[in-house]
Image: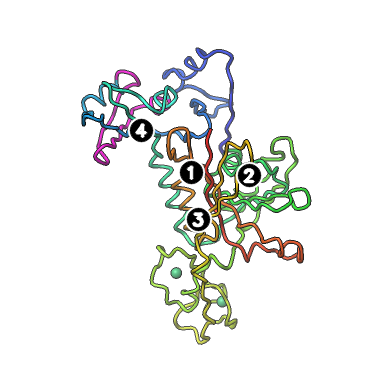
Amino acid sequence: MQKTAHITFTEQSAVQRCMENERRQTYMIDGYPVTVQRWMRTGILFERTNRLLIFVKPSSSGCTLDEKELRSYFETNYGPVKTFGWTLENVATIEFDDYDSVDRAIITSLTHTINGITVRLEKMRSFNVRQAYENIVAPNDIKFCVHVTNVPPHISGEQLAVLFGSRVWDVLIRKSINADTDPFEAWILKLNTLTDAQQLATSVKTIDGINVQCNAEEEPLNEWTLCSGNRDGWCKHGNDCIYRHITCKYGDECMYDQCPFSHSTQRNIVPNPRYRSAGLLNSVEAPEMLEGATIRYFYLVRQAAEKLARKRVYEWHDYPIRPNYTVKCQLEYDRAPIEQTSTASSVNTNSYQQLSTIFARNF
Ligand SMILES: [Zn+2]
Ligand SMILES: [Zn+2]
């Protein structure tokens, strides 16, 4: 299991020495190889990647940059370039030999001026991470998770992801109206085996000095994430369906006409159809900003499906929407309306709720 540690040096030259290529190949602790990378300030993709996206802003007179100019600028200043390509008319991708080249270019500045033309830089998610997202979102089977209770209210999904070696779209958070009486909880999702979950659960005891409880268990399964069209086996979307297809463990012998799981078309019982109220889906809520607040929150509430909510987090998290503004996302259950929590606090209201995803903030 991967662990991450942060080291702050007293001198900048120490960081430089630490990142020297020959040294970096040889770092070992107790016989395990250790990978080092520069710490990114909040708002910049922390993930290691060899790819840099370059947005060229042509000058008012229409002057722009060509491949040769871009290549030579980045090669001279940040190290060997492996490949170069134009993704769009004014958007280029550079692949460096070394991930540290990307970090050095980004740390220097998010905007660079080359021959009088301004370019904006962005780290591009590595192929591996995109692959990890694709693999994990597609399957419909139920996996395991670590259920964390008593989560300190100020902790973000991103911080939990780093702490548990997960990804931000695999961390689900439930906030409550009052954190004192009803502590926040979180689920670190998509763990392959119960053993993985158990190991991870024992590895974290406190978060920011607060004691937390971690339990390994099956992922929570919310009925509204299941495909109602596949209750009788007729959904044609297969793996691309935004709702989950989870086969009923009783198969076609299942006698329950309201059973939310998937059965085949051969089943004798006609399932009770269930319609979603489309008018309620996917609305944006932007709570009023408190005075002096530097973070602006937006909630995309009542997401139609879990897969869509996770996809939004994957696509938008760490997206620099404009200079000095980076979108941060996390996956949350919609907060229960006040009437619900005050009357029946023992009822698990999560099953009636859907997911929220986005919030944006500046730094
Ligand atoms: Zn379906
Ligand atoms: Zn069933």
Q: CA distance from mark 1 to mark 2?
A: 24 Å
Q: Position of residue 115 (x, y in %)?
A: 26, 21
Q: CA distance from mark 4 to mark 1?
A: 17 Å
Q: CA distance from mark 3 to mark 4?
A: 26 Å
Q: Earlier in the sequence, mark 4 or mark 1?
A: 4
The amino acid on which the numbered mark 1 sits, given as a three-letter code, is His
Q: Earlier in the sequence, mark 1 or mark 3?
A: 3
Mark 1–mark 2 contact, CB under 8 Å?
no
Tag in front: 3 or 2: 3
Q: Which quarter of the image is occupied by the N terminus?
A: top right
Kindly identify which residue carries mark 4. Answer: 52
Q: Position of residue 91 (x, y in %)?
A: 29, 37
The amino acid on which the numbered mark 3 sits, given as a three-letter code, is Ala
Q: Which residue range is magenta in the image?
A: 76-103
Kindly identify which residue carries mark 2. Answer: 200
Measuring 61% from the left and 57% from the top, which residue is drawn there? 334
Kindly identify which residue carries mark 1. Answer: 317
Measuring 39% from the left and 37% from the top, which residue is drawn there? 124
Tell me the crowding category of disc 1: few under 14, some 14 to 19, or many 20 or more residues within 10 angstroms, Cα based.
many
Kindly identify which residue carries mark 3. Answer: 309
Image quadrant assignment for residue 217: bottom right
Mark 3–mark 4 contact, CB under 8 Å?
no
User: In the figure, is residue 66 to the left or right of 21?
Assistant: left
Q: CA distance from mark 3 to mark 2?
A: 25 Å
Tell me the crowding category of disc 3: few under 14, some 14 to 19, or many 20 or more residues within 10 angstroms, Cα based.
many
Q: Earlier in the sequence, mark 2 or mark 4?
A: 4
Q: Earlier in the sequence, mark 1 or mark 2?
A: 2
The amino acid on which the numbered mark 4 sits, given as a three-letter code, is Leu
Q: Position of residue 241 (x, y in %)?
A: 42, 65
Measuring 41% from the left and 28% from the top, which residue is drawn there? 110
Tag in front: 2 or 4: 4
